[in-house]
Amino acid sequence: MASVILVTGGTGLVGKALQHIIETEPVGSKFGKQPNETWIFLSSSDGDMRDQEQTVKLYEKYKPTHVIHLAALGSFGGLFRNMKYKLTFLRDNILINDNVLHASYTHKTTKLISCLSTCVFPDKVEYPLDENKIHLGPPHESNFGYAHAKRMVDVQNHAYKEEFGCNFTSAIPTNIFGPYDNYDLEDAHVIPALVHKCYLAKKNGTPFIVSGTGKPLRQFIFSYDLAKLFVWMLREYDEVDPLILSVGEDEEVSIKEVADAIVKAVGFEGHYSFDTTRADGQFRKPASNKKLLDRIGGFQFTPFEEALNLSVKWFVENYGVARTGMKKA
Ligand code: GDP
């Protein structure tokens, strides 16, 4: 049977990675496109999914059998952006998610995977994070708006399953990086923000300044690896409960290690320091990928430095088109 796979937020970091994997893996292979599949990558210019009517129109137009729901407000922003727009991120994401989930139900979409984030987890929780701990306490105050909206997707997935038998689920990636990221100096996540800052420091002969102490730890997942995991989930994972998509807990990297690797990849040789007056955010939030490995039965993650080098190379070569939030000379 022919399938139409609709990817909302299809032109962002993860959407572009999905497109790359679908176009480059051999047709019919484990992570490649199947011959009977049509993939549609939506961008915000196709319609505003905060609006129910516009969302329904997109479902009527494409009649998706499967949906990978990546569209969100705030997902491309890091700590500093999330702290600024709590109500906007809460409300807009509630609207988007409710519209997408309900349209998937009314249009008989056979499978829906929504993308959450590890910021949904409680701030005070026993580590490592796992799929059973989402609702055990309030999220970190720095992003409670976004986090609560995303938590509700899991609640809705269960309710749609119980009342209507829908095959809706969610994925929880750890910190994602890769080509086509958001490189805004102030509003981006740590890797793209630092790649951009280091690139400018090298270009302008200015110091490279990293926010915070450099001590916090994060688990980073390369967007191309994540895309493969989404393709696998689409075909093989039929549980309602979320699945954490991450490298292992033993692969946490400190912000200082990230900055060091970026300095090396960019080839920056100037002065480099930490601005400890800026927020560190959560110190660490290790997540377990045990359930993922149990269900998929093994996966080859790209080594961090290799993925980082590839991402830096992409940024340098595509500086003119990258989302930097800046006017370019
Ligand atoms: P988080 O996992 O949601 O906190 O995601 P981020 O990608 O925003 O990572 C934040 C961590 O990186 C914090 O410890 C920040 O202090 C640190 N960091 C260092 N420099 C930067 C920067 O330029 N931008 C961001 N977003 N974080 C930075």
Image: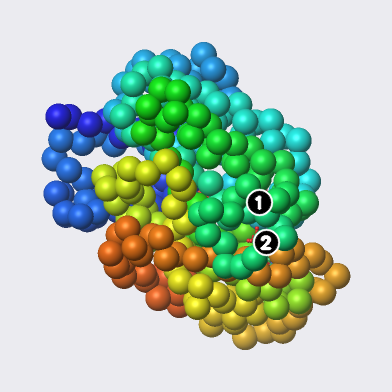
Specify whether 61 is left or right of 85.
left
Q: For ligand 1, tell me if the residue under mark 1 lies within 8 Å.
A: no
- Residue at 24% over, 54% down: 31
User: Which of the pair 192/104 is nearer the observer?
Assistant: 104
Q: Quadrant of the N terminus?
A: top left
Mark sitting earlier along the chain (2/1): 2
Task: Specify whether 70 is left or right of 128.
Answer: left
Q: Residue at 50% across / 29% down in the picture?
A: 159
- Amino acid type, callout 1: Leu
Q: Position of residue 122 (x, y in %)?
A: 68, 54
The answer to whether residue 262 is seen in the rendering is no
Q: What is the number of the mark on residue 227?
A: none
What is the x, y in percent for residue 327? 65, 49
Picture disc at residue 125: 2
- Is label 2's Cβ within 8 Å of ligand 1? no
Viewer-proximal residue among 188 and 159: 159
Colour setup of the view: rainbow
Number of numbered tags placed on the structure image: 2
Mark 2 neighbour density, 10 Å: few (under 14) some (14–19) many (20 or more): some
- Determine the residue positioned at 48% across, 34% down: 157
Disc ID at residue 136: 1
